Image (spheres, grey):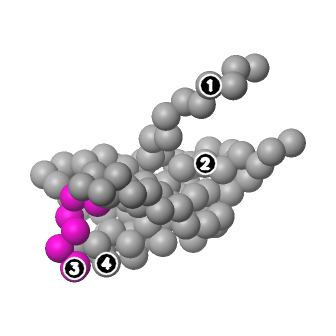
Amino acid sequence: MSDTLTPLLPLYSVRVSRQEVIGVPENTHANAALVAAAEQLGQCDGYIVLAVDPQTGEVDAHGPYDGMAATLKADRLRHEFDEGGLTDVSVGVVRLHAAS
């Protein structure tokens, strides 16, 4: 086993035109999109929501949550950042693997 950590990447989000979106069809209702994103997440001990500010380099971690709660938290944070004019902050969900 390597001591080198691999980069953390969001499991389901993509950036398009400075907005974070969930990769589901455009005509899907918002609640259905959240459910679809949560179902795409794999097996783990929980999920962490990361918010990364590219201007300051600051990274905030929220959690752990179960899959649906993490998806809802990420969606709330995205809306809060957008409303605050912080559209460049990236929000994503990553798997948590507890130390064994």
Residue bearing the label numbered 3: 83
Pinpoint residue 33: horizontal percent, then vertical percent. Answer: 38, 62
**Mark 4 vs mark 3, CA separation in Å:** 5 Å
Nearest to N terminus: mark 4 or mark 1? 1
Nearest to N terminus: mark 2 or mark 1? 1
Pinpoint residue 96: horizontal percent, then vertical percent. Answer: 66, 50
Question: Which structural element holds mark 4?
Answer: helix
Residue bearing the label numbered 2: 95
Q: Which mark is residue 4?
A: 1
Give amino acid for label 2.
Answer: Arg
**Mark 2 vs mark 1, CA separation in Å:** 17 Å
Nearest to N terminus: mark 4 or mark 2? 4
Q: Is residue 22 magenta?
A: no
**Which quadrant of the rendered structure holds the C terminus?**
top right
* Residue at 39% in and 76% down: 76
Which residues fall within the magenta stretch? 83-90
Q: Residues within 10 Å of mark 2 (few under 14, many from 20)?
A: many
**Mark 4 vs mark 2, CA separation in Å:** 23 Å
* Residue at 22% in and 79% down: 83
**Mark 4 vs mark 1, CA separation in Å:** 34 Å
- Pick the residue in front: 33 or 73: 73
Give amino acid for label 1.
Answer: Thr
Question: Which structural element holds mark 2?
Answer: strand
